[in-house]
Image: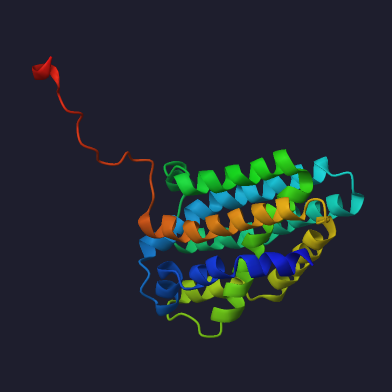
Amino acid sequence: MFTDLAHAATEASWTASKRHPFITQLCAGTLPLATFRYYLIQDHYYLQEFSKLHDLAADQSNDADVAQRLHAGAEHLRQGEIAVRQTFFDRLQITSEEVAATPIAPTGYAYTSHLYRALATSGPAGAVAGLLPCYWLYAEIGQELAQAGSPVPIYQDWLNTYDADDYTGMMADQLALANHVATPANQAELLTIFKRSSWYELHFWQMALDHETWALPDVAEPSDFSAEK
């Protein structure tokens, strides 16, 4: 099945995600709360586009079953994960003004752009493949780490979100959907999309840890060659 191939092909990057300092510090309780706040704001931007992509892909699908599942996924996100994120915002006093003052980070912008490109170039099947790593990786993180837990209550609650039955059930639906849309003709293309989304998932953690911005790097001033002319 496509999902078996995809999981095997991204094992190294997923292992790196699970061992990333953002995750290990979150589990140890040493992740700075300011970093978690920044992550939540960036994840808010991501989830908004993630939900839109479900609906866009559904609207472009000629398969009624695929369209129904994608619309259902979008609604589940709005009623579930996005709503839960709002409770974290409330607990951490993240205001709409703070969100508005925090631009989407370069990695988040690139990741969502990749997802839109997957839809534009590979149709609904491409969108399904691109969206899947987010569902699947977070479910694995929740299942593997929620029991070990974190001493920080809000970090523990974040882990529990991805170990809950409703989330793992939704993830299983997405696995089935990916296997439904994958064919011998598009499998290689979908696998590339899946791998790239997995790469972005890994770099999303680093983006949060770095509090990534659009600031230009420090570079040396160009040499003045006027004396040589």
Tell me which residue sits at (42%, 42%) in the image.
Answer: 101
x, y percentage for residue 198?
A: 58, 59
| Image location (x, y in percent) of residue 133 | 64, 61
The residue at the point 70 percent across, 46 percent down is: 53
In terms of image quadrants, where is residue 82?
A: bottom right
Image quarter (top left, top right, bottom left or bottom right) of the C terminus:
top left
Q: Position of residue 87 (x, y in %)?
A: 55, 62
The extreme front residue here reads 228
Q: Nearer the viewer, residue 224 or 212?
A: 224
Looking at the rendered image, the quarter that the N terminus falls into is bottom right
Q: Is residue 12 left or right of residue 4?
A: left
Q: Is residue 26 above or below residue 50?
A: below
Q: Is residue 99 above or below residue 5?
A: above
Residue in the image at 48% along x and 72% along y: 154
Q: Residue furthest top?
A: 229
Q: Nearer the viewer, residue 186 or 180?
A: 186
Instruction: Name the side, left or right, on which 27 lies relative to 189.
Output: left
Residue 117 x %, y %: 65, 41
Query: Which of the 4 image quadrants contains residue 24?
Result: bottom left
Q: How many marks?
A: 0
Residue closest to the far left: 227
Q: In the visual, does 5 lie left or right of 144?
A: right
Q: Nearer the viewer, residue 62 or 49?
A: 62
Query: Residue at image x 85%, y 53%?
Result: 66
Regarding residue 93, the answer to whether it shows in the image is no
Between 76 and 89, the one lying in front of the other is 76
| Residue 187 seen in the current view | yes
- Name the quadrant containing residue 26: bottom left
